Image: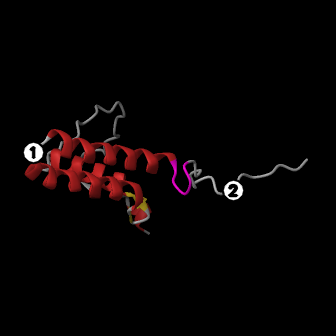
Amino acid sequence: MQFKTPQFIDIEDKIFGPLTFKQFAYLAGGAGLFYLSFRLLPLILGLVVGPAFAALALALAFVKYNEKPFIHTLQASFKFYTSSRLYLWRKVPKKAEPTTMSIPQAPRGNIRDTLQKSKLR
């Protein structure tokens, strides 16, 4: 019996023309924020914030860094800057476990007492 192995499972499906669903969602969200920034904010502030939203949306949709989507880089940098970066090494001594084995002790005395003349020949 033969089975067909799926291929190209890491490639997302194109749903909206040449765009995947994620790309379309990023671009639609960026366009909405761009529109709202000009509609709700004063013109000077809208000219600063609107293009920033558009650039972020374009980067999220199309930029890849080290063959990974830009969102992974953005998440990693956010986690890096918000987490603690103080690393201390403290040696934790191991607790000695009691042993139940008894060590045989050598007889106390001089080695010359244990040797006999017959063993020396």
Alpha-carbon distance for marks 1 and 2? Answer: 51 Å
| For residue 47, side relative to residue 59 (left or right) | left
Disc on res. 42 = 1
What amino acid type should be assigned to the residue bearing mark 2?
A: Gln
Q: Residues within 10 Å of mark 1 (few under 14, many from 20)?
A: few
Picture residue at 33% right of the left edge, 52% below the top: 57
Question: Looking at the rendering, which quadrant does residue 65 occupy?
Answer: bottom left
Vertical comparison of 53 with 100: above or below: below
Disc on res. 7 = 2
* Residue depth check, mark 1 versus mark 2: number of the one nearer the observer: 1
Within the magenta stretch, is there residue 17? yes
Query: Residue 28: x and y, percent?
Result: 39, 45
Query: Residue 84: x and y, percent?
Result: 14, 45
The quadrant of the rendering that contains the C terminus is: bottom left
Which residue appears farthest toward the bottom when viewing the image? Answer: 121
| Residue stretch rendered in magenta on the structure | 16-20
Within the magenta stretch, is there residue 47? no
How many numbered marks does the figure carry? Answer: 2
Picture residue at 15% right of the left edge, 49% below the top: 46
Q: Nearer the viewer, residue 64 or 13?
A: 13
Picture residue at 34% right of the left edge, 39% below the top: 103
